[in-house]
Amino acid sequence: MNYFLVKSEPFKYSWDQFNEDGQTFWDGVRNYQARNNMKAMKKGDLVLFYHSNEGKEVVGMAKVVKEFYQDPTTDDEKWVVVDLAPVQSFERPVTLEAIKADKMLEDVALVRQGRLSVMPLKQAEFDRIVEMGNS
DNA sequence: GCCAACGTTGGC
DNA sequence: GCCAACGTTGGC
């Protein structure tokens, strides 16, 4: 089992919209590193959903329901998408500020490499954020 | 293949 | 709205 975090601008695709849809393909990734992280996702892997720009907080948990395949929004075969479905909304969103302030989370890519939109998390980091979100 | 210029992302 | 960080592009 692997763990990831994905970013979305709420204007573009919000957590609420995601829950209404029930499932979505994660498109628009145009960065090799992020793409490679998506390719590493396996069905059943858990993914945290982060709102960038507005909110700047992790708002919930999703899971991979379909592994990577050709991005249907482009003919360029370099790019792929995965299908995600919501698992759970956090009771209290975990803000970037809180993540930065947490000793256990100081190494997460969200802090270290701000511009990466799809990143892997260690299980301990994932668990920690979930714990913060549900307490 | 290097590196400067440029564009984009995202926090503030 | 600004700007820093960083990935990508393109000229050489």
Image (cartoon, coloured by chain):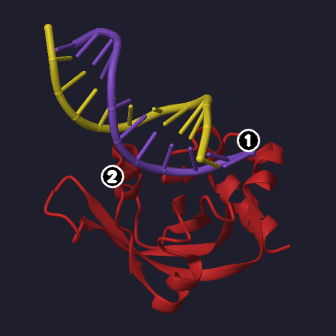
Chain colours: A red, B purple, C yellow
* Residue position for label 2: A30
Q: Nearer the viewer, mark 1 or mark 2?
A: 2
Task: Determine the chain carrying the residue at label 1.
Answer: A
Mark 2 Cα shell of 10 Å, populated few (<14), some (14-19), many (≥20): few
Mark 1 Cα shell of 10 Å, populated few (<14), some (14-19), many (≥20): some
Q: Nearer the viewer, residue A48 or C7?
A: C7
Vertically, is A119 above or below A27?
above
Q: Residue at x 40, y 65 (%)?
A: A42
Q: Position of residue A78 (x, y in %)?
A: 20, 52
Find residue A20 and name its label.
none
* Residue position for label 1: A106
Residue A46 as seen in the image, left or right of residue A81: right
Q: Residue at x 58, y 68 (%)?
A: A49
Q: Secondary structure at mark 1?
A: loop
Q: Amino acid at mark 2?
A: Arg
Give the distance between the C-alpha atoms of the residues marked 1 and 2, in whole angstroms. 26 Å
Q: Secondary structure at mark 2?
A: loop
Residue furthest to the right in view is: A135
Residue A85 as seen in the image, left or right of residue A100: left
Q: Position of residue C7 (x, y in %)?
A: 38, 37
Q: Amino acid at mark 1?
A: Glu
Instruction: Same chain for labels 1 and 2? Say yes or no.
Output: yes
Quarter occupied by residue A33? top left
Q: Position of residue A116 (x, y in %)?
A: 49, 47
